[in-house]
């Protein structure tokens, strides 16, 4: 557990979120106690993450793909996708013909906002809702 915690804290090639890092810290502390089973309340670690918000480009707005020649992309929906382990955009390139039925899905990290043009909002991980303002402003 000590090595796992060191790797999570020090290795720049390992991308560890705060929830995972906190879980590793608790597991490490429990592992130091001899004869005590490793256990802790997962809810106290996971619950704060359920109430967090993620900044996103709102549906109906345009962003730029960070690959494929920075094409403009119209966001039609923002949703959680388990395959990508996170939020995704569903939409179309602005260059696509209107009757073209192909819909494209990108992880949100693959699309950049266009300053002054992209409408920004916040995805609530707990409810799955999109908000134009942060919760404390609603």
Image: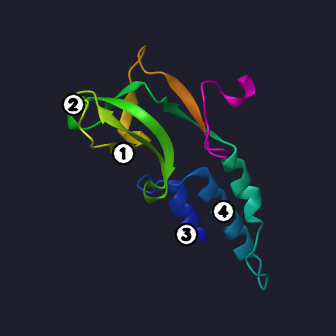
Residue range highlighted in magenta: 124-138
| Tag of residue 97 | 2
| Tag of residue 130 | none
Residue tagged 3? 3
Foreground: disc 1 or disc 2: 2
Whether residues under marks 2 and 4 lie with C-beta atoms below 8 angstroms apart, the answer is no
Distance (Cα) linking label 1 and label 3: 37 Å
Residue 14 place in picture, x, y as percent: 45, 57
Q: Quadrant of the C terminus?
A: top right
Task: Report the side of 116 relative to 93 (left or right).
Answer: right
- In the figure, residue 122 lies in which quadrant? top right
Q: Return the residue found at the far top.
A: 116
Q: Is residue 31 above or below residue 109?
A: below
Residue tagged 1? 105
Q: Quadrant of the N terminus?
A: bottom right
Residue 32 highlighted magenta (yes or no): no
Report the number of discs: 4
Density class for disc 4 (Cα within 10 Å; few <14, some 14-19, many ≥20) is some
- In the figure, residue 91 lies in which quadrant? top left
Q: Is residue 23 above or below residue 73?
A: below
Which badge, 1 or 2, is on the more N-terminal residue?
2
Residue 127 highlighted magenta (yes or no): yes
| Tag of residue 23 | 4
Which badge, 2 or 4, is on the more N-terminal residue?
4
Foreground: disc 4 or disc 1: 1
Foreground: disc 1 or disc 3: 1
Q: Nearer the viewer, residue 45 or 54?
A: 54
Distance (Cα) linking label 1 and label 2: 17 Å
Residue 96 place in picture, x, y as percent: 22, 32
Density class for disc 3 (Cα within 10 Å; few <14, some 14-19, many ≥20) is few
Which badge, 3 or 2, is on the more N-terminal residue?
3
Task: Report the side of 67 relative to 118 (left or right).
Answer: left
């Amino acid at each position: 557990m000590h090595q796992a915690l060191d790797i999570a804290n020090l290795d720049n090639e390992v991308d560890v979120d705060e929830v995972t890092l906190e879980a590793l810290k608790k597991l490490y502390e429990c592992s130091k106690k001899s004869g005590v089973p490793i256990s802790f309340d997962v809810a106290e670690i996971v619950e704060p993450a359920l109430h967090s918000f993620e900044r996103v480009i709102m549906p109906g707005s345009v962003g730029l793909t960070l690959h494929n020649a920075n094409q403009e992309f119209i966001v039609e929906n923002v949703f959680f996708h388990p395959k990508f382990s996170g939020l995704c955009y569903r939409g179309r390139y602005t260059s696509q013909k209107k009757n073209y039925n192909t819909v494209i899905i990108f992880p949100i990290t693959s699309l950049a906002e266009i300053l002054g043009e992209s409408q920004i909002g916040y995805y609530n991980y707990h409810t799955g809702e999109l908000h134009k303002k942060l919760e404390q402003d609603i």
